[in-house]
Image (tube, helix red, strand yellow):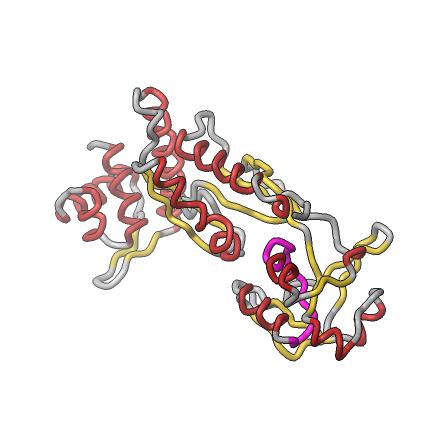
Amino acid sequence: MDTLLSMRVFARIVESGSLTRASDTSGLATPRVSALLRMLEQHLGCKLLNRTTRRLSLTEDGQAYYERCVAVLREIDDMEASMSHSRNAPRGRLKVSMPPAMAKQIVVPALPGFLAAHPDLTVELCLTDRQVDLVGEGVDCVLRVGALDDSGMIAKRIGSLTTCTCASPSYLERYGIPETIDDLAQHIAVNHTSADTGRPRSWTFAVDGETHIVQMRSTVSANDLDTYIACGIAGFGLITTTLFFVEPHLKSGALREVMAEFNPPPRPISVLYPPNRHVPAKLKLFVDWLAGVYAAVPTLQGGRQ
C-alpha cells in the first residue's frame, strides 16, 4: 500500500466532503479513491469515516488521524519546497482566517497586488470572529485582535488598534456630550453584537489606569460593522469601535469623537500559525506582506493620521 498517497487521498476526501469530489481534485478514478480509503482503514485497523449514501462524517479515530495527516503532509510539502530550486516562486493554496471587517476594509483592497506578484498562489479567506482550530480546520494562519492565550502557536505582532467612542452631531445636540463614565447612564448606545455568539460586545473604558466595563442602554443593535457605524451616523446613539473604521467619518464631520481620554489601551493585532521547523515559504511570504500592509497605516499601529 502507498501510505503517503492514501494519506493524501484521505485528506482530500475529508476536505472535499465526498469521494467523487476527492476523485475530481486528485485526478484518480472514484473506485481507486474508495479502494485507497478501504486499504488505509484495514492497514490502521480502525474505521476513519462513517459513510452513508448522502454524507460522510469523521469517526473519533478519523478526526485524530486527519489532524495528524494534515501536520505530516504539511511537513513533507515544506521539506520538498525547501529542497526545490523553485522555492523563490512559492505556489499552492493559503487558507487564512480573519475577522470579516479586517478582510473587507484592509486585506482585500491590498490583495490584488500580492496575487499579481505571486501568480502561482491562491488565497482562501475564512471570515469569522471566533477562534478557529488551525490544525483541525487546516488553516495556515489566523489574524487575531487582543491578548493571546498560550495556544502553543507562533505569534507575530503586526499592529495595534485604537478604540474610538463617537456619535453623530445630531445625537450630541439632542443628548449632550458625555464627559465622564457616570454621564453614560444618561445616554443611549448602538450595541454591536457578535455575528458568532449573538452577544453584545463590551463597552470598555480606562479610568486612572483601571478598566471599567459599562452596560449601555440600546434601542438598535447590529452584528455587521458597516451597519453598526451607519446606525451611529444616523443618530441612533453612541458607538464604540476601532478608530481605523470610523476615521473617514470623523474627518467628514458625520461623526464626532467623545471621551477620548477614557479610551482603553490599544489592542494588539497578531498573526498566528502552527509551530514548524520549516515555515513554508508561501506562509512566510504572506505573513511578511500582511505585516507590511498594516505597518503602512498609522491607525493600524495604535496611532492617528
> Residue 60, position in %: x, y?
39, 50
Q: Is residue 148 visible?
A: no
Q: Is residue 31 visible?
A: yes
Asked if residue 240 is among those painted magenta in the image, a careful observer would answer yes
The residue lying at 36 percent from left, 36 percent from top is: 117
Image position of 5 (left or right of 212): left
Along the line of sight, which residue is nearer the eye, 16 or 189?
A: 189
Identify whether 181 is placed above or below 133.
below
**Residue stretch rendered in magenta on the structure:** 235-246
> Residue 40, position in %: x, y?
25, 40
> Residue 229, position in %: x, y?
59, 67
Along the line of sight, which residue is nearer the eye, 204 or 13?
A: 204
The quadrant the N terminus occupies is top left
Along the line of sight, which residue is nearer the eye, 124 or 251?
A: 251
Image position of 70 (left or right of 134): left
The residue lying at 27 percent from left, 45 percent from top is: 12
Image position of 55 (left or right of 257): left
Which residue is most to the front? 252
Asked if residue 163 is among those painted magenta in the image, a careful observer would answer no
> Residue 57, position in %: x, y?
32, 56
Q: How many marks?
A: 0
> Residue 27's image quarter?
top left
The residue lying at 47 percent from left, 25 percent from top is: 277
> Residue 256's image quarter?
bottom right
Image position of 138 (left or right of 52): right
The residue lying at 18 percent from left, 48 percent from top is: 24
